[in-house]
Image (cartoon, rainbow, N blue to C red):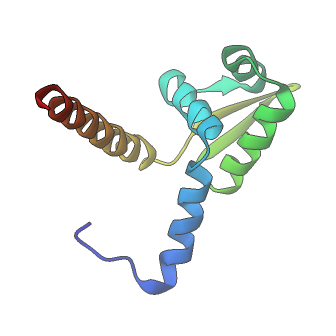
Amino acid sequence: MTDLVPPQLLEQVAARFRVLGDARRLTILRELLQSGELSVGELVARLDTTQANISKHLSVLLQAGIVARRAVGTSAYYSVTDPSLGPLCDTVCNRLRDQGAEQARILSTA
């Protein structure tokens, strides 16, 4: 982090990480990033969960400004609108892969 976040924004940063700190929401976001746009019904089928569960998590993501909603008839379609999400996920996942590889290397030499 080259630029420090001003103290008055730290609570907003923490709130964003709380939204992203749920495995089900991350699973929904992964599906949306891979597909571009999906309906609630498509997410329910892909993630083998209930409509209420998906809708609850999509509501949190929508309120946080991470996804957008588009209504078509009786269906709602969601897509990721936060351009920082892909690079952020890549950074975190790559770091976890590196840490796992390093731990495996250490264990194999022990």
x 56%, y 49%: residue: 20
Q: Quadrant of the C terminus?
A: top left
Vertical position of residue 66 compared to residue 98: above or below: below
Q: Determine the residue located farthest toward the front in the rendered image.
A: 110
Tally the marks.
Answer: 0
x 71%, y 40%: residue: 69
Front one among 16 and 75: 16
Residue 76 percent location from the top left of the image: 78, 30
Residue 18 percent location from the top left of the image: 59, 58
Front one among 67 and 22: 22
57 vs 36, left or right, is right
Q: Quadrant of residue 74?
A: top right
x 59%, y 65%: residue: 15
Residue 19 percent location from the top left of the image: 61, 53
x 23%, y 36%: residue: 103
85 vs 97, left or right, is right
Front one among 73 and 106: 106
Residue 54 percent location from the top left of the image: 76, 33
Q: Quadrant of the N terminus?
A: bottom left
